[in-house]
Amino acid sequence: MASMRDIKRRKGSVQSTQQITKAMKLVSTVKLQRARASAENSKAYFNCMYQTVNRILARVGSLQHRYLQSAGSGKKAVVVISSNRGLAGGYNSNIVKLVTRHEGWDREDVLIYAVGRKGKDAFVREGYEVRMDLSDVVEEPAYPDAMLLCGELLKAYAEGEVGEIYLAYTAFKNTVSHVPTLLKLLPVEQAAESEGEEPEVPMNFEADDEEALEMIIPKYVASLIYGGLMEAVASENGARMQAMDNATNNAEEMISDLTLKYNRARQGSITQELTEIIAGAEAIS
Amino acid sequence: MAENNCLTLKIITPGRVFYEGEAEMVEFNTSEGEIGVLPGHLPMTVIVKPGVLTITEPEGEKEAALHAGFVEILPDKVTILAEIIEWPSEIDAARAEAARERAQERIHEHASDTDMARAETALLRAMARIQVIR
């Protein structure tokens, strides 16, 4: 049995760890609330954008356009949104696994656009090509950041360097449920048609169809990236909150366990001392 | 009667709902020129160019600098999806002035490596800002 001093030291260290995890949990709770509010604010914009784009796509139908058909290159650009800091449970490894374990994706065919240092490091370790690193963005995502990233992606797409663009992020369902999601950004898939939903009014465009696509699709992609960033930040803090909550509970359990052990050891040592004294006294008399 | 003379205007940016209310007329600059939208307009989607946005409310006029985005017009409703939009109070006059000079210089020099389209957009933006403040 460990000595009383050892148990006491162990308990002290668990206690100070618990204080840290408790503080981290509180911090991520506050951050989660903020991230969630701004994710909800950006939803209105995103929904409107989605409707408009679908309406346009439903109209132009099978138009030959580079944003609607793949340019041919087999390479895929994947924007991976992870976090800069760890201690968020499986948050980062889940999103990395989503890409590395994707069927039919070879390491050589995938170009990573990393947002978040943890994800970037993991992909470097796995031997993927990381084309761009925008890790600072995760701290406080702003729309210009999404526009910048979108510009880079569209440039690579226009030059034929990549044929498809994907976004890997963690969707925020609610505080406890976060789902790693892979979203195809380009070429745009025409999901609107299959739904068979007729727009209630015929829509006219001041510019012609092709021009409208040319202008609106980049904005659409940027808004998807922005939405992904907002949700990912909310998910990150949610995941961290959960992880830290579990850690705090585990520490609590360990502390009560150690306290019990400590008390046993203390009682044991007292009993032993008493026996020794009594034995000593008997030996003298 | 007053109800019929108004259209519902909604301005949404990626970060927030910028404006929501009733307006008699909405004016702004598009890729095809400046337009004013009255209630009962033909359904249309237009693309925004940097310029001044004027909202005519029953009580008076409001102005803002609208830089990028697109607008969906329906007979009784106008939705502006703005990437960048500012109220006059949010604009830094000195900075806008400096940006205008810089853009003008770039266009005048016409160096081979300048992106003319970008410089022109920057100039339009700066001018929209300055106009709104006045």
Image (spheres, coloured by chain):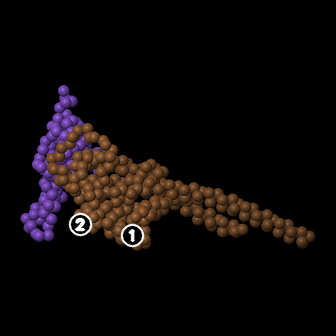
Chain colours: A brown, B purple
Q: Which residue is mark 1?
A: A107
- Vertical comparison of B29 with A76: above or below: above
- Vertical comparison of B35 with A120: above or below: above
Q: Which residue is mark 2?
A: A159
Amino acid carrying label 1: it is Arg
A240 and A178: which is toward the camera: A178
Which residue lies most toward the right here? A285
Q: Quadrant of the N terminus of chain A?
A: bottom right
Which residue lies most toward the left here? B108
Mark 2 vs mark 1: which is more N-terminal? 1
Local packing at callout 1 (Cα closer than 10 Å; few below 14, some 14-19, many 20+) is some
Q: Residue at x 8, y 67 (%)?
A: B109
* Residues at marks 2 and 1 touching, judged by CB atoms closer than 8 Å: no
- Element type at marker 2? loop
Amino acid carrying label 2: it is Glu
A108 and A277: which is toward the camera: A108
Quadrant of residue A188 in the image? bottom left
Task: Determine the chain carrying the residue at label 2.
Answer: A
